[in-house]
């Protein structure tokens, strides 16, 4: 348990690391959205608390988030993802998004976001799409369940209604404009051989170009857990100081790192207050 002195010291070290950086890499997992009221599906209990119908049927996250479910029971799959799409559309990014953006804009090479979140909250918070890489895809884009024509299209015009008590879609199923079969979100699902990664690969190429000239990188990792360690692994492998914000899994094996066992908004508020101390954002 950290005392007040330890907390202040770690927040001050984090602020100084960001201050000294010439580029800020923001890496984020599901914990980034908790302060915006979004569920993070931590384990099957987290999923079942948000979706009681799945608890009743003993359906776990890897089962509902699978390409087979879209093929075998698309009404159930879209009951889940349709509800999530509506939830993410309605959610407002918490102030932490803006706090990071203000710090990142000060850096000589600016900032870049690398996230496993599919919710589009960084875009909604005003981050340019060219400075975001979504390694698991986006719920705001669609594709055919078979990857028909290798086409990815926007879900902006898609209106979904759901019966949340049964986790079922009640509006017509989204369809592929080419073959007429069911469409699905352009998200990397469990055991997914049909996901079309082209949109993410284009984003990744932007990220690699952004990263190339940076000599003093700070990685600000927020809410990335160990269940899907893509984000955590990246931060530990890159050269640069890693600041890991996570209330339950703050530990890190990286030598040049700092652990902050707090929620996203709490930690970001503390860091930015010290970052802008005696200055104006």
Image (cartoon, grey):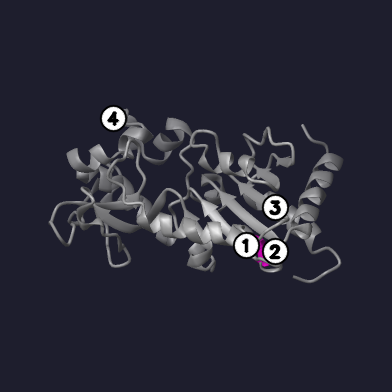
Rendering coords of residue 32 (x, y %): 56, 50
Residue that label 1 marks: 111
- Marks 4 and 3, how far apart at CA: 44 Å
- What range is drawn magenta here? 98-104
Indicate whether 153 appears above or below 87: below
Q: Residues within 10 Å of mark 2 (few under 14, many from 20)?
A: some
Between discs 4 and 3, the one toward the N terminus: 4
Q: Which residue is mark 3?
A: 218
The label nearer to you, 2 versus 3, is: 3
Structural crowding at the residue carrying mark 3, measured as other residues with C-alpha within 10 Å and reported as few (<14), some (14–19) or many (≥20):
many
Whole-angstrom CA distance, mark 2 to mark 3, is: 12 Å
Q: Is residue 108 magenta?
A: no
Q: Which residue corresponds to mark 4?
A: 57
Label 3 secondary element:
strand
Q: Name the mark nearer the viewer: 4 or 3.
A: 3
Gap between marks 2 and 4, in whole Å? 46 Å
Task: Return the disc, 2 or 1, that comes first in the chain's sequence.
Answer: 2
164 relative position to 277: left or right:
left
Q: Please tell me whether mark 2 or mark 4 is closer to you in this view.
A: 2
Which comes before the other along the chain, label 2 or label 4? 4
Residue shown at the point (72%, 61%) measured from the top left: 22
Residue 100 highlighted magenta (yes or no)? yes
Which residue lies at the image location 26% right of the left edge and 55% below the top edge?
Answer: 143
């Amino acid at each position: 348990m950290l005392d007040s002195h330890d907390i202040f010291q770690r927040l001050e070290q984090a602020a100084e690391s960001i201050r000294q950086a010439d580029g800020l890499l923001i890496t984020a997992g599901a914990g980034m959205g908790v302060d915006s009221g979004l569920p993070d599906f931590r384990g099957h209990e987290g999923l079942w608390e948000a979706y009681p119908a799945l608890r009743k049927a003993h359906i776990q996250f890897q089962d509902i988030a699978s390409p087979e479910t879209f093929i075998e029971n698309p009404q159930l799959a879209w009951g889940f993802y349709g509800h999530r799409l509506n939830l993410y559309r309605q959610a407002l990014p918490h102030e932490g998004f803006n706090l990071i953006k203000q710090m990142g804009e000060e850096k000589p090479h600016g900032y870049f976001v690398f996230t496993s979140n599919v919710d589009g909250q960084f875009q909604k918070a005003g981050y340019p799409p060219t400075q975001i890489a979504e390694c698991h895809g986006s719920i705001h884009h669609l594709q055919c369940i078979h990857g028909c024509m290798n086409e990815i299209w926007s879900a902006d015009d898609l209106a979904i209604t759901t019966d949340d008590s049964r986790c079922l879609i009640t509006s017509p199923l989204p369809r592929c404009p080419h073959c007429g079969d069911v469409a699905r979100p352009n998200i990397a699902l469990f055991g997914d051989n049909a996901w079309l990664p082209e949109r993410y690969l284009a984003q990744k190429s932007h990220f690699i170009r952004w990263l190339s000239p940076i000599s003093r990188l700070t990685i600000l990792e927020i809410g990335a857990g160990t269940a899907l360690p893509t984000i955590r692994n990246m931060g530990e492998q890159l050269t640069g100081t890693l600041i890991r914000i996570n209330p339950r899994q703050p530990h890190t094996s990286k030598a040049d790192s700092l652990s902050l066992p707090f929620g996203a908004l709490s930690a970001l508020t503390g860091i930015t207050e010290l970052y802008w101390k005696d200055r104006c954002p």
